[in-house]
Amino acid sequence: MIEVRGLTKRYGRVTAIDGLSFDVLPGRVTGFLGPNGSGKSTTMRLVVGLDIPTSGSVAVAGRPYRELARPLTEVGALLDAGALHPGRRARDHLRWLAVTNGISRRRADEVLALVGLESAARRRASTLSLGMRQRLGIAVALLGNPGVLLFDEPINGLDPEGIVWVRRLMRSLAAEGRTVFVSSHLMSEMALTADHLVVVGRGKLVADAALTDFVEQASLRASRVVTPEPERLASALDGAGATVSAGPDGLLEVTGLTTARIGELALAASVVLHELTPVRASLEEAYMELTADSVEYRVADPAAGARS
Amino acid sequence: MTTAVPSRSGDGSAWSPASGDGSAWSSTRAFGASISAEWLKVTTVRSSYITLVVSLAAMVGVSAIVCASNVSSFDKLGLLERTVFKLTFDPAFSGVSGVFLAQLGVGVLGVLTMTSEYSSGMIRTSLAAVPRRLHLLMAKAIVYLVIALVVGLVGSFCSFLVGQSILSGAGLSTSLSAPGVPRVVIGGGLYLAVLGLLGVGLGAMIRRTAGAVAALFGLLLVLPAIAAALPSPWGPDVSRYLPNEAGSALLHLTDRTDVLAPWSGFAVFAAYAVVAMVLGSTLLLRRDA
């Protein structure tokens, strides 16, 4: 379990994290989602005590990370897969880490096998591909067989087979009752892996919800209505508090009302309906909507640029 | 990957590690483990060996060249001048003078023990494994101090023997049993050990290789040049307290007025390394990794 309480981190005048509070519970995969620069990596670094919070606190396994006697046996983290000495062999990298926490050196070979890197055990880090480094980073996280696991963008650089493997690994770790906290800027990836989502934007908490509740919370449910009398229906729906936008050929897009209510209002107004379809926003749309105000680096609208 | 694909919802039960008893893991044991790990880090990278072997070879080589050039200038002198030369010549210092080249390699490797962790980002892995930051820095310092001391002693001893065999042709040599000579030969090792520690401290303070190496070379090479340019009463007074001048007091066999007494000079030199380590520790504890 990871407990984040009122966590704030400022670097000079830049506020990276602004009063974040949430829990990451065991037994499920919690996705940590946000645009680039929204504070995900900063939060991860604060969790493992690398950065010192400006205010607030984080506890892992009940205590601040720095107070853990053998931290690798309680928390495993993949923060930056490239963080290797280029001249050191993969197995040696795991061995020195094992030694720091009194983990048997045999375990280094075990985790190498677990991530499918046995054949690369004697290769120097500089000769490993990005995907292999990512696997080695995951091996480091698993080294102490910890109950809490953090992965910062674990699928970066992985091939499709590797991505599927990581998804299965996350799910199986959570099923064993471990706490699994995975960051990503890709909603589509989280949709496939996570049970629960913590969404941040500009260092602030945007959502903390089960994956299934996430779309509803984003209140993006809409309905597609087709009618020969769009003007009459639109005014009737408008009067009931809906937001209506008209398309071609009598198409209306309606938000703010359920399909059942739209049907009732159409009947009351004696308008014929040719189509009434609920449109569920995709997770991607829900995510875009939620974080729309909090994207730090947005590409300027090219059309707007051309006009000026 | 052989793990079965689990169902989508975990049962929510807390994970309990098989053997996660932190209470048996004392701070002393943790520190010992950090030292072993740092030893593994140094010995599993080829560049460590290359740098140390090159430093060792440079030390012996330069000492041999200095001794040979002394012999050749001695050979050109007349009888009376030879007597004067012998009065002021320091065969032990010439024999270990290669430390002044070896110090660059040993110092840079000391810097790299810290800065290479920052440049690769590995410092985050290291601090995640060893969150007690002083443990990490002290383990590095101890491991590297011992390595620099051993390399320094071996280099100093070899340089001395090679140097004396060259000097003996002109009758200028001394021996290990002569008064003060063991202090000079051991001093060569101590000098490099302290220099290695100074490098580690500067690396911890500055974090970037280029900056830390520049600071090290500034202390060792640039400051003495500036001090030498100072007007008469100040120049020598400042010079003798500079790191390499103070440290090399241990390497002079004869009493000299322009350097501190051997052990007080060494103490001043060691103080530089200690100050660098204290500043490095303070900054390591305060800064984000």
Image (cartoon, coloured by chain):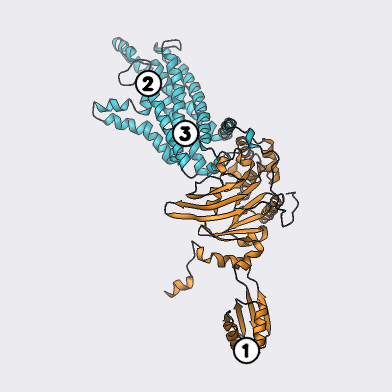
Chain colours: A orange, B cyan
Look at the image and tell me whether residue B219 can be seen: yes
Residue that badge 3 annotates? B200
Residue lying at 50% horizontally and 31% vertically, measured from the top left: B141
Task: Write down the chain letter for disc 3.
Answer: B
Question: Foreground mark, 3 or 2?
Answer: 2
Residue that badge 2 annotates? B264
Q: Secondary structure at mark 1?
A: loop
Percent across and percent down for residue B275 are 41, 32
Which of these two is toward me, A174 or B152?
A174
Co-location on one chain, circles 3 and 1: no
Which of these two is toward me, B146 or A47?
A47
C-alpha gap between disc 3 and disc 1: 81 Å
Residue that badge 1 annotates? A229
Question: Foreground mark, 3 or 1?
Answer: 1
In this rendering, is residue A302 above or below B179?
below
Residue lying at 31% horizontally and 27% vertically, measured from the top left: B239
Q: Amino acid at mark 1?
A: Glu
Q: Secondary structure at mark 3?
A: helix
Question: Foreground mark, 1 or 2?
Answer: 1
Q: Quadrant of the C terminus of chain A?
A: bottom left
Q: Is residue B172 left or right of residue B157?
A: left
Which of these two is toward me, B11 or A285?
B11
Q: Amino acid at mark 2?
A: Ser
Task: Write down the chain letter for disc 2.
Answer: B
C-alpha gap between disc 3 and disc 2: 23 Å
| Label pair 3/2, CB-CB below 8 angstroms | no
Q: Secondary structure at mark 2?
A: helix
